[in-house]
Amino acid sequence: MIILLLGAPGSGKGTQAKQLVEELKIPQLSTGDMLRSAVKAGTPLGKEAESYMKKGALVPDSLVLGLITERIQKEDCKSGFILDGFPRNRSQADALGAIFTKFGKKLDCVIAMEVAQNELVERLCGRRTCQNCGQGFHVKFQPPKTEGVCDKCSGKLTQRPDDNEKVILDRLKVYQADTSPLLEYYKSKGLVKEIEAGKGSPQDIFKKILAVIK
Ligand code: AMP
């Protein structure tokens, strides 16, 4: 099954993708994670992407299309995968369609995760991630037992450099302008399942997602 999670930054795509990975035994393909790894590793692609990411802008399509094209050909993507954070604009969506045609794949469903804008800012500002195991926390909604320390592995919790208020507002503007039109694009293909993702626990939202994909 190939699932696309569509939603603004902070709408919970990453959290839900991780639960879907467990449930469906298919991998999460997050272009944001791939780009952050490339930045951390200091690869030429990472160096090129970093300046865009710091500003909250989209990195050039050619970079993410290269990453996705390579990734979907891997063995673990044979039974499907979860797209998280890709496509982010119309040209990426068109390119994805062409890539799927080339490799004989088909998008099964688009889960549109809806959260009010003021809620998104609060979610993103308080988000913390374990730099060791990647577990996510939130200073208000899901605080760790000890401040700054991961409950799972005692690793140090860090804040993403682009999770500061100025960059968050820029990322949300980019979402509105470039990514949100994809909702209509995929609706016209009859693929969209809309989920109210602003209320309830991550577990409640996961149940709603399972109900629509099963
Ligand atoms: P995310 O982790 O999905 O919030 O992405 C973090 C940042 O990575 C974004 O603000 C963009 O700079 C970049 N990025 C991630 N995915 C894409 C994409 N599909 N196209 C362009 N830039 C992306």
Image (spheres, rainbow, N blue to C red):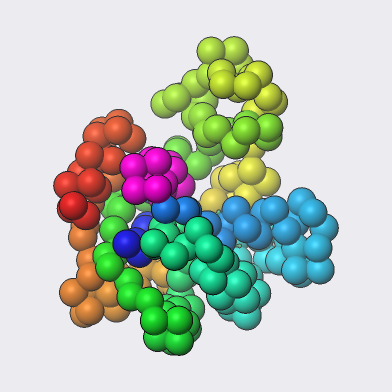
The residue located at (23%, 46%) in the rendering is 210
Say which of 26 and 144 sits in front: 26
| Direction from residue 141 to residue 111 in the image, left or right | left
The residue located at (71%, 66%) in the rendering is 49
Say which of 113 and 115 sits in front: 113
Indicate whether residue 105 is drawn in magenta: no
| Direction from residue 126 to residue 105 in the image, left or right | left
* Residue 123 drawn above or below residue 151: below
- Please, what is the dominant secondary structure of the magenta stretch? helix
For ligand 1, which image quadrant applies?
bottom right
Whether residue 121 appears in this view of the structure is no
Whether residue 20 appears in this view of the structure is yes
Percent x, y for residue 45? Answer: 75, 68
Percent x, y for residue 59? Answer: 63, 70
Toward which corner of the image does residue 103 lie, by quadrant? bottom left
* Residue 84 drawn above or below residue 205: below
Range shown magenta: 13-25
* Residue 171 drawn above or below residue 184: above
Q: In which quarter of the image is the N terminus?
A: bottom left
The residue located at (23%, 70%) in the rendering is 191
Say which of 201 and 121 sits in front: 201
